[in-house]
Image (cartoon, helix red, strand yellow):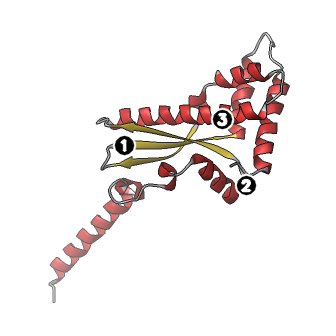
Amino acid sequence: MLNTKNYIALRLVLCLLLFTLSACGPKAFQGRLSPAPEWVFNSLQKWDSKHFAKTGELIIHGHGMSKEQNLISKRRALADADATQDVKKRFIELYTQSLAGDHNRQAFIKIINELSWEQIALNSERYFDVEKNQQHTLVSVSQARLLDALNFERSMDNQRTTNWNQVFQSIKSMYQGLSTRNPQ
């Protein structure tokens, strides 16, 4: 049987170890120990559909990656920027398809293209592949975030050269159309 002082010291060490591990949180051990998330290797259209089926909200995702960067901040920034460009490209492709035949098509696409996508896209998840030294970032854009950005642009348009109601309606129509067909 352990003497009382050793037993108390052992319990104290175990409690401190457990406290330290719990303070680190589950994300502290990602990389080597956790498998890559689905979105790293699967198509984002499937990821969008899966999210829509689960939540009922249409979110458009973008995936970015950076390779062989030693500084954590730099590799994250590069992956974030790549993901933001990817979600912008995916959104504009869907938006362009939804505007087929609209006489304001080019003007609307120009407005959307000039938005501050760094402010619109939200970082959803990050994953670092230790073996390949690759940082992956998943970003998302919801209808609400996009409409908020457009509201801001409308408030800054002092010359009132744009018919903002038509732009808003075209975005809402696109999301409604994608929602009814469950984005593929």
Note whether 36 is above or below 162 in the view shown: below
Residue 134: numbered disc: 1
Q: Residue at x 73, y 55 (%)?
A: 56
Residue drawn at (20%, 79%) of the image: 7
Identify whether 12 is placed above or below 48. below
Q: Position of residue 86 (x, y in %)?
A: 55, 35
Residue 147 appears in the rendering: no
Secondary element type, mark 3: helix
CA gap between label 1 and label 3 equals: 25 Å
Residue ranking furthest to the front: 101
* Mark closer to the observer (2, 3): 3
Task: Tell me which corner region of the image, top left, top right, bottom left or bottom right, holds residue 93.
Answer: top right
The residue where tag 2 is placed is: 56
Question: Which amino acid does the dot numbered 2 rest on?
Answer: Gly
Compared with 141, 109 (above or below) is above
Helix, strand or loop at label 1? It is strand
Q: Which mark is residue 91?
A: 3
| Residue 144, position as x, y percentages in the image | 72, 39
What's the residue type where badge 1 is placed? Answer: Gln
Measured as percent of width and height from the top left, residue 85 is found at 54, 31
Residue shown at 63%/49% (left/top)? Answer: 48
